[in-house]
Amino acid sequence: MMFFEKFFKKKEKNSFAANENVQALHKNLPFTASEQYRMLRTNIQFTLPANVKCPVIGVTSSIRGEGKSTTSVNLSYMLAEKGHRVLLIDADLRLPSIAKKLDMKGAPGLSNMLVSSNMDMEEFKSDIHDQWYILPAGDIPPNPSELLGSERMEKLLDTLKEQFDYIVIDLPPVNLVTDAISISNFLTGMIVVVRENYVTKHDVDNCFRQMNLSNVNILGFVMNESSQGGGTYARRKNYKYYKKEQ
Ligand SMILES: Nc1ncnc2c1ncn2[C@@H]1O[C@H](COP(=O)(O)OP(=O)(O)OP(=O)(O)O)[C@@H](O)[C@H]1O
Ligand SMILES: [Mg+2]
């Protein structure tokens, strides 16, 4: 697959260790990486409240480059692979990356949909899996934070929830802009990606402080590029232990 090769090329260039445990994306994945994302899928499903028809899961982090988009792509793909109808939304409206990662057009997308509501979701069905839909960011708007927290966004999500089993939303980092906090009222919960040996404890504390102040429902966090191999997921209570031990 085109995007699969492209993903690997990108990975070689960045500073992540060349570790075969952390390759990602798709059904040709090496066993260990697929297993990590499958485990993430299972843990998320246990963490989510049982009575929610279509959970809306936000994915954020403290700073840029921690692996939010990679996690969003793989988590949503794994949910689709399980037979759920899944929508992945790129809501990093300032620096969108999902379309590029998956070799698709970046517009029209979310920002356009927020202005004209009569767009057909079938247009966004991925070629990779027929239960996997991908809504790119669309044209870059002047006011992302306002848009993401707007009544229009809430209405759009309500409409989309009728059509899908899960919605996964890729967001910008909390410490940089208010976008992730702005949309948080419309989410079932948030996953926080923490890239080991990259983000400082101060950054992570700052991020969690902001989310706590805004009462964001944190589902758990993903340790990306974890020394335990490939990435691990922990529920929120484990984060408290992590905080105490530091
Ligand atoms: N577990 C991983 N193993 C190897 N490479 C990874 C892993 N996670 C992310 N990467 C790579 O690191 C880079 C940053 O990842 P990604 O784009 O997912 O981060 P992000 O948090 O979405 O960044 P941004 O804040 O800029 O949107 C990408 O080139 C991606 O391919
Ligand atoms: Mg990203």
Image (cartoon, rainbow, N blue to C red):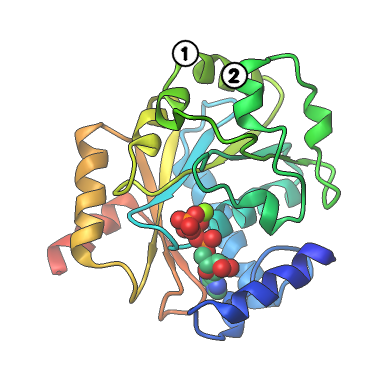
Identify the residue shown where x is 78% and y is 36%. 124
The percent coordinates of residue 162 (x first, y second) are: 67, 19
**Callout 2 crowding tier (Cα within 10 Å): few <14, some 14–19, many ≥20:** some
The percent coordinates of residue 18 (x first, y second) are: 56, 86
Whole-number angstrom distance, CA of label 2 to CA of label 1: 9 Å
Q: Which residue is mark 2?
A: 156
The answer to which of 142 and 145 lies nearer the viewer is: 142
Above or below for 16 versus 163: below
The percent coordinates of residue 181 (x first, y second) are: 34, 34
Please state if 23 lies on the left or on the right of 122 as rendered: left
Identify the residue shown where x is 76% and y is 67%. 4
Please state if 121 lies on the left or on the right of 20 as rendered: right
Please state if 138 lies on the left or on the right of 198 as rendered: right
Above or below for 102 versus 165: below
Above or below for 29 versus 239: below
The answer to which of 213 and 148 lies nearer the viewer is: 148
For numbered disc 2, what is the local secondary structure? Answer: helix
Residue 120 seen from this side:
yes
Q: Assign the N terminus to one quadrant of the image.
A: bottom right
Lower position in the chain sequence, tag 2 or tag 1? 1
Identify the residue shown where x is 13% and y is 62%. 244
For numbered disc 1, what is the local secondary structure? Answer: helix
Quadrant of residue 111 in the image?
top right
Tally of numbered discs: 2
Q: Which residue is mark 1?
A: 151
Residue 187 seen from this side:
no
The answer to which of 42 and 146 lies nearer the viewer is: 146
